[in-house]
Amino acid sequence: QVQLAESGGGSVQAGGSLRLSCVASGYSFSHSCVGWFRQAPGQEHEGVGAISVHARMAYSADSVKGRFTVSRDNAGNTVYLQMNSLAPEDSAMYYCAATRGDCWSPLSKNEYHYWGQGTQVTVSS
């Protein structure tokens, strides 16, 4: 059974940083794109970052460009989302997701087959 588990969320003041982790069990990230999405109450899922198979390419949404970075550790089957200069509008539930192969639209949720349960990020002003 494939399971993705996020960790690292929490409460932080504006301007602070958090690093989220996504660990897979029952599945290898080595041949997947892995993406990070967030969803605030009443809003749609927003793709914030993704990394392609073999980490050839990393992608960031315009809203987080220059602040959020996705990286991966295939040996540890873990993907990270480093979030710097956090702002209150970054508050949301953050999810990681994985594809079954490479991805064409890495920030589109429709690309992804496996999802974690999410970790909450709250940024106070």
Image: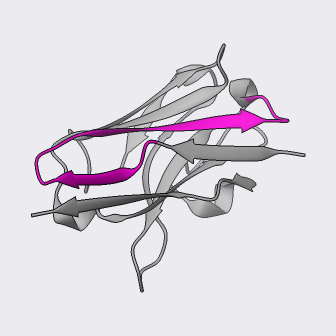
Count the marks: how many? Answer: 0
**Left or right: residue 86 compared with residue 121:** left
Q: Does residue 27 show up magenta in the picture?
A: yes
Magenta extent: 8-28
User: Where residue 61 sits: x, y (%)?
Assistant: 34, 52
**Left or right: residue 8 compared with residue 3:** left
Image quarter (top left, top right, bottom left or bottom right) of the C terminus: bottom left
Q: Residue at x 12, y 54 (%)?
A: 14
User: Where residue 13 sits: x, y (%)?
Assistant: 15, 53
- Foreground residue among 49 and 120: 120
Q: Is residue 88 above or below residue 27?
A: below
Residue 32 visible in the displayed image = yes
**Left or right: residue 2 compared with residue 112:** right
Q: Residue furthest right?
A: 1
State the image quarter where residue 2 is shown.
top right
- Foreground residue among 62 and 28: 28
User: Where residue 108 sits: x, y (%)?
Assistant: 55, 59
